[in-house]
């Protein structure tokens, strides 16, 4: 049995992220999920997410902390890569999902062990 060691690089600088308490943050998707570039302590990440949400979306993320999920359940560390492929079409050159992705400034997906450009992202979901 062989073990693949994940290569992890520093996160890239991506447009659309704004820095709060030294942490680059952006909203991702359409459900209020958040991403911070790099691996951050959950409490520090929450402070940055909360400030981002207050300034960008005008509400207080702390209200969501009254639910059943703890901070450690909501803040996760994941390995992602920047991609221009959907990963679902087998590299079909006519894939409309891939075409849509290429119109975005960046697109992120979860890294696989084979990826050589994986970087840590701290997420809020
Ligand atoms: Zn595709």
Image: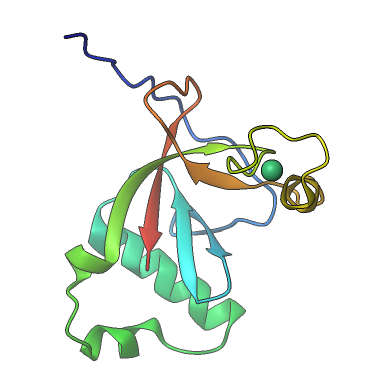
Q: How is the image coloured?
A: rainbow
Residue in front for this viewpoint, 52 or 34: 34
Q: Position of residue 41 (x, y in %)?
A: 25, 52
Q: Position of residue 69 (x, y in %)?
A: 19, 77
Residue in front for this viewpoint, 101 or 91: 91
Please give the name of the residue rendered at 78% of the width and 45% of the height, measured from the top-left corner.
Answer: 102
Residue in front for this viewpoint, 33 or 111: 111
Please give the name of the residue rendered at 28% of the width and 16% of the height, measured from the top-left corner.
Answer: 5
Q: Is residue 75 above or below residue 24?
A: below
Q: Is residue 45 above or below residue 95?
A: below
Which quadrant of the view contains residue 114? top left
Which quadrant of the view contains residue 29? bottom right
Q: Is residue 94 left or right of residue 54?
A: right
Identify the image quadrant of the C terminus.
Answer: bottom left
For the image, the number of numbered tags is: 0
Q: Position of residue 80 (x, y in %)?
A: 46, 40
Q: Is residue 56 left or right of residue 118?
A: right
The quarter of the image that holds ligand 1 is top right
Identify the image quadrant of the N terminus.
Answer: top left
Residue in front for this viewpoint, 112 or 12: 112
Please give the name of the residue rendered at 46% of the width and 74% of the height, measured from the top-left corner.
Answer: 51
Q: Position of residue 116 (x, y in %)?
A: 48, 19
């Amino acid at each position: 049995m062989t073990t693949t060691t994940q290569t992890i690089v520093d996160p890239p600088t991506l447009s659309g992220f704004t820095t709060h308490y030294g942490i680059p943050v952006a909203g991702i998707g359409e459900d209020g999920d958040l991403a911070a570039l790099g691996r951050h302590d959950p409490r520090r990440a929450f402070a940055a997410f909360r400030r981002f949400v207050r300034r960008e979306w005008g509400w207080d993320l702390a209200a969501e902390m009254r639910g059943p999920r703890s901070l450690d359940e909501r803040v996760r560390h994941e390995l992602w890569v920047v991609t221009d492929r959907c990963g679902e079409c087998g590299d079909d050159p006519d894939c409309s999902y891939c075409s849509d992705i290429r119109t975005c400034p960046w697109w992120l997906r979860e890294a696989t062990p084979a990826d050589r450009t994986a970087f840590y992202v701290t997420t809020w979901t």
